[in-house]
Image: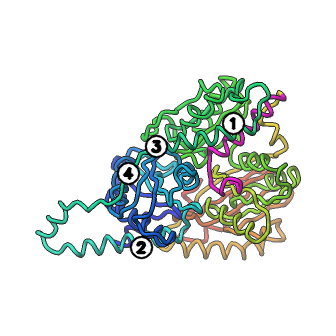
Amino acid sequence: MATEYKKLQNGSDIRGIASEGVAGEQVNLSSEETKYLTLAFVHWLSEKMKKRPQELVISIGHDSRISAQTLKEAAIQALLQAGAKVLDCGLASTPAMFMSTVFPEYKCDGAIMITASHLPFNRNGFKYFDQNGGLNKGDISWMVDWAADRAAQEAADVRTEDEAAAHATQTPKKTGEVEKADLLGTYSEFLKEKIIREVNHPQHRKTPLAGLKIVVDAGNGAGGFYAQRILQPLGADVSESQFLEPDGTFPNHIPNPENKQAMASLSEKVRKTGADLGLIFDTDVDRSSAVDRSGKEISRNAIVAMAAALIAVEHPGTTVVTDSITSDELTVYLEQCLGLKHLRFRRGYKNVINKSMELNASGIDSQLAIETSGHAAYKENYFLDDGAYLATKIVIKAAQLAQKGVGIDVLISSLKEPKEAVEVRFPIRGDDFTAVGTRVLEELKQWAREKTGEGVCMVEPNYEGVRLNFRREGLSGWCLLRKSLHDPILPLNVEVTEGGCDEILYEIKGFLSRYDEVAVDSVE
């Protein structure tokens, strides 16, 4: 029982298979698992807040996934069983759910978002918040163990067939209450007021986006509200926006700013319609990327550069914390063009956020934590990774620049790009993939030391995997080999400014070929 629940943990989130429809996949996140995980959250929150469950106010919302309603109903029943007051927020974004703990209209003790981000349509999961932000990996581990123990205990209490029948028909006593809440409306007003205040348009006070044509691509997730309830009322032309309707089958493309098809679709639409800007969100709107007026993608390293450029003037010298796969060119841009500091840390949005918060606690100013995936968390916004908030800062700057006749692309015009960049993923065979990955990385360090005379050197300090620089005649680039956060895979990122990625890939594949557990031949 405990093992099955542990499989649902994905770092600081819960994710599982919530509906049928994919061959060979069995549902492992049903109403039953939802019940016990929700009760675990109530228990955790009660201990954290030092309140009885009956004193707690907990909000719940969901994105457009097809299993959302079923899981929401199960979670609400569990919350009521525990005695909590429930705010049913319906369709919502993950950042809005956290803001339900901040907005004075709600002041919730905790929040539950039902989402599995960009994963396939049959997946779903939960993100949990208290008033300090999203829960950490250790908190989720505790909840998973508690839920498994509670489920096992209740199952053991049902000993005979007669008792089982009685248990199956018994309805738990509900002591809590449910209220409906238009959280997205409140959240939209919050962002609208920010745009009005900061654009401060001299002629169009209430419609500061008048004259801007913006294409929003919501990917049929929860992000359609951004065009309909924020941009359009403020005067923007959003008529060419696409896939705003929530549809959990995701019929057009994966709602993911890292997806090549999704970004290509938005780029084409911006070019064809002559829009000033394109914005794209993932399913639950905690990530975003953009496209400039020429149709050029502002994603991965470029979205990091953009997010940093938006605060560089107000916070000179601040440290920007990023994930481990950012480019050397980004470091040059952040430090030499913007005058900021760059700390390249680890993959995982909670990792970069926690590191940035740690720096601030130690007296080092860090205003931004961001992954190349589009998770951007500003200190000014509670270190909440909020795709709509990043989009709002971009829109504000676009409106300000439009008054001067220039586009948003001017902000990152100095950012250089690598000649070539690739990512390959080497599968690890066998069950103990963590131990294999650890051994491979340790021995790669020794291999690099032996290659020092051949233009290979380790990058230090380095906080994840092994990062190597390659500097020799005709070749200048780097690679990062690391363990996947959750899967039996060794991802390898390679970038070059001179030569080809295949030269570095050839050497790393040669090194990995000594390990029977690493499926080198499966990677072209």
Which label is found at residue 178?
4
Q: What is the C-alpha distance between the residues marked 2 and 3?
A: 29 Å
- Percent coordinates x, y for residue 28 in the rendering: 35, 59
| Circle nearer the N terminus (2, 3) | 3
Is 476 placed left or right of 109 in the picture?
A: right
Given the image, on which type of amino acid does mark 4 rest?
Val
Residue 402 sits inside the magenta stretch: yes
Given the image, on which type of amino acid does mark 3 rest?
Leu
| Circle nearer the N terminus (1, 2) | 2
- Percent coordinates x, y for residue 380 in the rendering: 71, 54
| Circle nearer the N terminus (1, 4) | 4
The image quadrant that residue 156 belongs to is bottom left
The image quadrant that residue 98 belongs to is bottom right
Q: Quadrant of the N terminus?
A: bottom left
Q: What is the C-alpha distance between the residues marked 3 and 4?
A: 16 Å
Number of callouts: 4
Neighbours of disc 3 within 10 Å: few (<14), some (14-19), many (20+): many
Q: Circle 1 sits on which residue?
A: 291
